[in-house]
Image: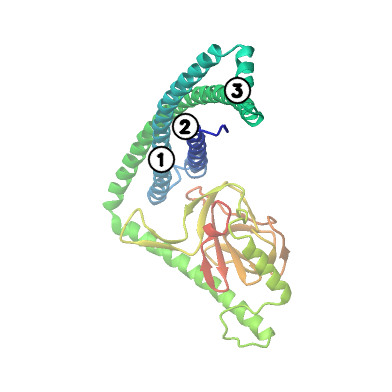
Amino acid sequence: MKLTYTPFTLTVFLLTLMLHISSFSQSKKQQELEERRRELTREIQQIGVLLFEGKKEQKSVLSVVEDLDFKIKVRKNLISITNQQANLLTREINSNQTKISKLRLRLKSLKDDYAKMVVKSYKSRADQSKLMFLLSSTNFQQAYKRLQYIKQYADYQKLQAALIKEETIQMQQLNIELVKQKKNKQKLIEENRMAKSILDQERAQQNVLIADIKNNLSKFTTQLKAKQRESNKIDKEIRKIIQAAIAASNKKAGKSSKSKVFSLTPEQKILAANFTSNKGKLPWPVTNGVVKLRYGNNPSPIDRSLTIKSNGVRIATNKGAEVRAVFEGVVQGIMTPKNGNNTIMVRHGNYITVYKNLSKFYVQKGDKVKTKQVIGEVITNKASGETILSFGIYKDSATQNPSQWIYRL
């Protein structure tokens, strides 16, 4: 007689395996949410330091509303992530409670089976009984099979004992995890309650300011439009310089100057390929900062009918912050417009990175730069006390979304 795993023990094994896989999946998701929550918490702290501390008295109402709108968006994201964490914990708690109930039933069944085997073993415990069982065999083959049965039955008893021990340990671990999960959930609920309270205060503050703005909306709308025109003018000049560089590269290569893409040397092709291979991994152009304005079209918090178009991102940083090249390359050009929005452009093959709103330059046109090399310093607005770097990326003359290129922008 050959002893095999019963359907019951096979089911125990499969269920245990499924529980472990499910727990791993949920744990990984929880880790991802916790990492994102910590990032948003750090970002809110940075926003407070970079945009609000010691600057309220200097700022215009327009800037305060814009910064509050930005901070509110980040805090809403934080609340949303925390809610997701709490909901996931609720599902995990319910799942663990179900697992514990099933384990209790399985443990009871295992113990009952084991008790029956112990009783049966006790009744036939004498070595003489086992010996008589073997000697009563009609032939050698039957005696061998009976010997195998005795051995396998003993192994099966050990297996049942091991299963009981394993299930008991697993249930104890689940109980410990359950207590921990309940504490974590309560902590998240408390944090969310505080975050919502602060959010309500910020919204109330913003509403007061917006009400004041609405009394003279045309004035602020005019200011916004003027800012956008100024930004568009600088972007137009940047594109002209890039297009001129494209035309020069094609002329040098003996190609049509009307081409809209760079004609690259073998070295420049390698540089462009290296730049592309680092997409999503490039360093920040400043060591400390928060993205105040994203790439693309952004609705104005002052006048929702207006759209703020951004060919790059605006990063709030510390006073006197140094600007770093995000990749090795050559300084393509330097702009010093009358409005003081000084700009450096660095070429990486057929890619151009643009650094605007600088007070100092540490490089000049034609210089070779390395990754993270300091190339300038961000200017601090005397009226608002803000230090904002405008950063953009172009592929030939087409704008790119910096968030897709810079690590965790």
Q: Left or right: where does residue 269 sit relative to residue 237?
A: right
Q: In the rendered structure, which amino acid carries the disc numbered 1?
A: Gln
Mark 1–mark 3 Cα distance, whole angstroms, equals 50 Å
Q: Is residue 368 above or below residue 188?
A: below
- Name the residue carrying label 2: 8
Q: Quadrant of residue 279?
A: bottom right
Q: Left or right: where does residue 27 sit relative to residue 268?
A: left
Instruction: Residue 235: give x, y in percent of width and height.
Output: 51, 69
Mark 2–mark 3 Cα distance, whole angstroms, equals 18 Å
Q: In the rendered structure, which amino acid carries the disc numbered 3?
A: Ala
Task: Using a 10 Å C-alpha cutoff, classify the residue at mark 2 as few (fewer than 14 neighbours), some (14 to 19) or many (20 or more).
Answer: few
Please tell me which of labels 1 and 2 falls first in the chain: 2
Q: Residue furthest left?
A: 215
Q: Which residue is drawn at 30% across and 59% down?
A: 218
Q: In this view, does 126 lie above or below 283?
A: above
Secondary structure of residue under mark 3: helix
- Tell me, what colour scheme is on the image? rainbow
Instruction: Residue 221: give x, y in percent of width and height.
Output: 33, 59
- Name the residue carrying label 3: 154
Q: Nearer the viewer, residue 172 or 383?
A: 172
Q: Residue at x 56, y 80 (%)?
A: 260
Q: Left or right: where does residue 400 sit relative to residue 225?
A: right
> On residue 163, which mark appears?
none
Q: Residue at x 64, y 17 (%)?
A: 131
Q: Residue at x 73, y 65 (%)?
A: 368
